Amino acid sequence: MPAFDFTPLIAPGAPPPAAKWTGSPRYNFTGGNNDPAQVPVDDLLSAAEAVLRREGRSLAYYGVAHGPQGYRPLRDFLAAKLKRDAGIVCSADEILLVSGSLQAFDLINGALLAPGDTVIVERDTYQGMLNRYARAGVNAIGVPLDRDGMQIDALERTLVSLNTKGVRPKYIYTIPTVQNPTGTIMPVTRRTALLALSEKYGVPVFEDDCYSDLIWSGERPAALYAMSGSGNVIHIGSFSKSIAPALRVGFIVAPWPILSRMIALKVDAGSGALEQMVLAEYCAPHFSSHVPALRQGLRKKLEVLMDALDQQFGIAAEFDDPPGGIFLWVKLPDSVDTLKLYQSALAAGVAINPGPEWSTDATHSKSRMRLCFASPTEQELREGIEILADICRTTFGVPERSGNIARRPKQA
Amino acid sequence: MPAFDFTPLIAPGAPPPAAKWTGSPRYNFTGGNNDPAQVPVDDLLSAAEAVLRREGRSLAYYGVAHGPQGYRPLRDFLAAKLKRDAGIVCSADEILLVSGSLQAFDLINGALLAPGDTVIVERDTYQGMLNRYARAGVNAIGVPLDRDGMQIDALERTLVSLNTKGVRPKYIYTIPTVQNPTGTIMPVTRRTALLALSEKYGVPVFEDDCYSDLIWSGERPAALYAMSGSGNVIHIGSFSKSIAPALRVGFIVAPWPILSRMIALKVDAGSGALEQMVLAEYCAPHFSSHVPALRQGLRKKLEVLMDALDQQFGIAAEFDDPPGGIFLWVKLPDSVDTLKLYQSALAAGVAINPGPEWSTDATHSKSRMRLCFASPTEQELREGIEILADICRTTFGVPERSGNIARRPKQA
């Protein structure tokens, strides 16, 4: 019997078929993976044992009968943590636990966005969000960044220009605290100005706070959510970067009138309860000691990466030493097309994020790339960058041969 | 400062806001909850310990670096289990692990359905699916059931009629093995006929197999997926009914040309890996002994429920003794409107599923209700049904007063 042909039945606009997965690249500088050596296995194991022994029978109920917003003790932990770290005063009732921050994206976008809508984003921003806008037929307008994050004067020009055209954007999506991919932190004065523009133009702020635990200094500005006087901010976060990304636990903090819209859209019968339970049991006693140790290890890896780039690329690789996070945003010479570099490097087992996939501006991002440094070993970081430099040299003629490479002055 | 008003920004067609959750009803006959006493806590705990000790560090990678189809050992377990129990010959490469069967719905519908499309379903069917069609603007045509499941002659009439109108339905959604809510099992001859009609009209079959582990006899017909010679079936299943619903782990089995479309739509960075890991570690040694014990306990609860209905409703409650599952589909006298009964009962702490929410036919289902019996205790089953009968009597005059109630003949 001939194979049944599904082709004529596929929904219009469905993405093309996925390719078969062929394993992880040997040198993986992509994805938000974390450092395997820093997963707190023993304490997670003890937490799993304690919570299963105490509450395991409740797994018989969807969402362990804690309602659609998720496991209550984890929401209580978050309410306390958000107050301590980010200045956010909220109760467990304003928190919705979700299956990773990507489900937060889908719920927020589901409540607010329709095809043809406009949103304002940072010019360089998270690829997963840009892909969602493309699929949803949403127009994402990028606002340039500088070392203090989104440029407020450019944001205002964008808002004025849209207003003139009668367009009210649905929100301003920002990653103000360790911006992805640029790594910048928006200072308080700029946060205040951003919130004022949000008020003035009636455009809410979507604050993506997924990286804020990973600031080397351990000090962060208050969240936009905390600074808002009017409830014009939706705040999301995740345990992917602070604990482990394979645990799919993220969260949304939002005023009830909009949070209740997202809960109505969350028709998944709850996010994974075991992961929420283990995290709650683990985080209450361990989060505040685990994260500083994690940061220290990540900082060390970043230094290895920056040193390897200096060694292999010299002045051909420009970057700022980021104040935290798990990625470095690197500018290569204008002659380099990182989409092409990505293809050649992948064939050699080195995966990078080409700039154009992380930007609304293909020209600006053409020679830029994002390098994630949390999961490779120090040896892999060094070897991978050496291979990447070789491929870049073969393909684009830069950097100069490493023997006589022009070096950046040593960082302070 | 006045509160920011999100109302003008809400996407057209977004569902109304969720109500605040106020806790679980005292007597809960709704939802696919399981029996808390039957959650294999100790063995799940040992599994969690073993797998975390061995592979915990891999939580640092999205999807523990097993690729977008999910944790490989769980897919291997499923391939073996599906072969043994359902006759399905497939490899781990044809299996996609998802966050509960509801995500399976969303991925299958996402790949195939557009607003205005038509699907064929069983007249009485799963509410979560009907709600999805309503939201997606999809036309669901119900085919009547009898004690052998979907009626094939009625299905053919529907296919002919649609064909005449130039409508090619996107799929036939069926729950052939312990149908939800009617509890029927489709015999092999009817399965063969269903597959032949699918071939003839070029309409694939969507086989929802979530309850097939819970057949009292332990024996099930081969899955439609196993019987298909042409790859015209998409098969889904779940661990919610066999292990625990709070673990959000379901799966899709499908030929690669359509499975690859679903993988492309699964942009969630993986489903929860810890739950997949614990299930794989638990199921390999324990699944085949756990499930028969679970079934025995569920059968006992069903008998309590049926006895309570006999005692309290007498001949006013008509139902077939189902061959498996966790729910009973009950017909009350025609004068009873179960949507109204639902409201009154909920106010008294008794939650039921009113028929019209589980059917494409409001008239047929008006006096029917679904009662889930897995999670209440035997005492709660008896007390809840007594309260329900009192409310039904007060509101609709039936059943007769329990002292002189007309009783059904004792079941064989």
Image: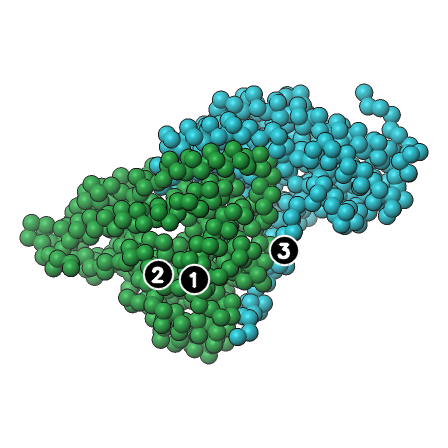
Chain colours: A green, B cyan
Closer to the camera in the image, A203 or A401: A203
- Quarter in which the C terminus of chain B is drawn: top right
The CA distance from mark 1 to mark 3 is 25 Å
Task: Indicate left or right for A61 with A244 as reference.
Answer: right
Extreme residue in the left direction: A404
Determine whether, in the image, residue B17 is placed left or right of residue A407.
right
Q: Which mark is residue A87?
A: 1
Look at label 3 and name its amino acid. Lys
Name the residue beneath numbered marker 3.
B20
Left or right of A156 in this view: A68 = right
Q: Amino acid at mark 2?
A: Arg
Q: Residue at x 87, y 25 (%)?
A: B409
Residue carrying label 2 = A220
Chain to which mark 1 belongs: A
Residue A83 falls in image quadrant: bottom left
> Can you give x and y, in whole percent of width and height, for residue B189 in the image?
68, 24
